[in-house]
Amino acid sequence: MITVTTNEVPNKNITDVKGMVQGSTVQSKHVGRDIGAGLKTLVGGEIEGYADLMKNARDIALDRMIKEAESLQANAIVGMRYQTSQVMNSAAEVIAYGTAVVVE
């Protein structure tokens, strides 16, 4: 599946627009990560546990969006974006969305 953030795929012609597709996941923090993150804020630097959690969430959302595009018989997604939001104090939602198209 070709997935781009641009509205066109270079050197390809969009022959059909299938519609908007999306995939999402809600991930919660782990108590152990919270304790480690709290300690990390004292000295600064990357909080690797959270970085890994968010990367995994983006991967899940992207995979779900691609599956939805495949179910529409699309072979590309254009205008792809990620969005994240806090849905409760200890959980975040990641959404991947874009437009499923057929390119030649």
Image: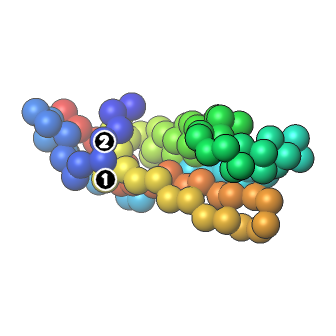
Quarter of the image with the N terminus in it: top left
> Which of the labelled discs sits on residue 6, or is there none?
none
> Disc 2 marks which residue?
4
Residue at 87% x, 41% y is 32
SS label for mark 1: strand
**Residue displayed at 65% across by 58% down:** 93
Q: Position of residue 60 (x, y in %)?
A: 62, 39
Q: Amino acid at mark 2?
A: Val
Q: Residue at x 30, y 41 (%)?
A: 4
Up-down relation of residue 71 to residue 19 (above or below)? above
| Rendering coords of residue 81 (x, y %) | 40, 53
Q: Earlier in the sequence, mark 1 or mark 2?
A: 2
| Residue 86 appears in view | yes
Q: Which residue is mark 1?
A: 79
Q: With respect to residue 19, does 10 lie above or below?
A: above
Q: How is the image coloured?
A: rainbow
Q: Is residue 77 left or right of residue 24?
A: left
Q: Are marks 1 and 2 in contact (CB under 8 Å)?
A: yes
Using the numbered discs, state the Cα–Cα distance from disc 1 to disc 2 in whole angstroms.
6 Å
Is 68 displayed left or right of 90 in the figure?
left
